[in-house]
């Protein structure tokens, strides 16, 4: 997959808003590969993933399995801390 603007891409896709149903039968590879963006159903999948540590450096800038987490100062690099401070202290510029 290649995408430069994932947020922009997703903003025009259909999003679910009602009538959610859990589907407990097995969803196999055939069902997933035959899924079309125009279909009226979508999937949230819980998977068991084996991800080789050899791939970590290769994918560090584009994680294949992002996770929900709280970002705190302890995990920021020095560059990120510097950028955060410069961004957070600037006043917004209003163009006339």
Image (cartoon, grey):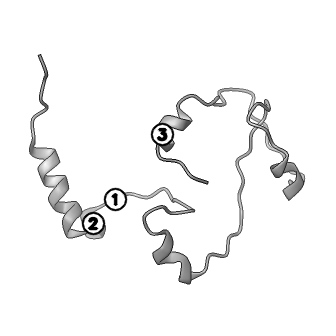
Distance CA(mark 3)–CA(mark 2): 23 Å
Q: Position of residue 13 (x, y in %)?
A: 61, 31
| Marked residue nearer the N-terminal end (2 or 1) | 1
Distance CA(mark 1)–CA(mark 3): 20 Å
* x 47%, y 42%: residue: 5
Q: Tag 3's secondary structure? A: helix
* x 81%, y 50%: residue: 32
Q: Tag 1's secondary structure? A: loop
Q: Is residue 81 left or right of residue 90?
A: right
Q: Position of residue 67 (x, y in %)?
A: 51, 59
In the rendering, which numbered label is found on residue 51? none
Distance CA(mark 2)–CA(mark 1): 8 Å
* x 16%, y 47%: residue: 87
Q: Is residue 21 left or right of residue 9?
A: right
Q: Which residue is mark 3?
A: 7
* x 56%, y 52%: residue: 2
């Amino acid at each position: 997959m290649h995408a430069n603007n994932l947020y922009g891409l997703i903003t025009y896709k259909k999003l679910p808003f009602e009538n959610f149903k859990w589907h407990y039968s097995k969803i196999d590879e055939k069902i997933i590969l035959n899924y079309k963006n125009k279909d009226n159903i979508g999937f949230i999948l819980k998977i068991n993933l084996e991800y080789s540590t050899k791939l970590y450096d290769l994918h560090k800038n584009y994680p294949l399995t992002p996770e929900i987490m709280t970002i705190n100062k302890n995990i920021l690099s020095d560059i990120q801390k510097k950028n955060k401070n410069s961004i957070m202290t600037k006043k917004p510029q209003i163009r006339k």
